[in-house]
């Protein structure tokens, strides 16, 4: 009887580990697609509607220049 309980415990552990691994893989894949340097494929057309500011290197933090500001 004890060996049957141990066998069920091993099966439950394997199922939970496989489910956790699949969930981790899915989340990592979606995160990779979202952080794609070419474009944000998850939020498709929003990039065209609202352009991102230009990034520039500055000497001091108080002299930052962005596109569209004075």
Image (spheres, grey):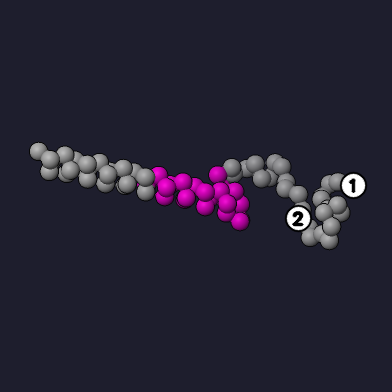
Type of secondary structure dominating the magenta stretch: helix
Disc assigned to residue 49 = none
Number of residues whose C-alpha sits closer than 10 Å to that of mark 1, classed few (under 14), some (14–19) or many (20 or more): few
Residue at far front of view: 2
Quarter of the picture holding the N terminus: top left
Q: Is residue 29 magenta?
A: yes
Tell me whether the residue at label 2 lies in contact with that at label 1, contact meaning CB atoms closer than 8 angstroms. no
Q: Which residue is depicted at the point 12% across and 40% down? A: 2
Left or right? Give the position of 23 relative to 66. left
Left or right: residue 18 versus residue 1 is: right
Counting from the top left corner in percent of width and height, residue 14 is at 26, 46
Circle 2 — which element?
A: loop
What residue does disc 2 label?
55
Q: What SS does tag 1 mark?
A: loop
Answer with the quarter of the image where residue 55 lies. bottom right
Q: Name the disc covering residue 70, or none.
A: 1
At 16% across and 39% down in the image, what residue appears? 5
Q: Which residues are magenta?
A: 22-42
Q: Write down the quadrant of residue 10 in the picture.
A: top left
Q: Residue furthest left?
A: 1
């Amino acid at each position: 009887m004890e060996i049957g309980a141990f066998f069920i415990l091993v099966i439950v552990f394997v199922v939970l580990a496989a489910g956790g691994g699949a969930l981790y893989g899915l989340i990592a894949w979606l995160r990779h697609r979202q952080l794609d340097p070419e474009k944000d494929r998850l939020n498709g057309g929003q990039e065209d509607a609202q352009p991102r500011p230009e990034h520039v290197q500055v000497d001091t933090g108080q002299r930052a220049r962005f596109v569209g500001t004075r």
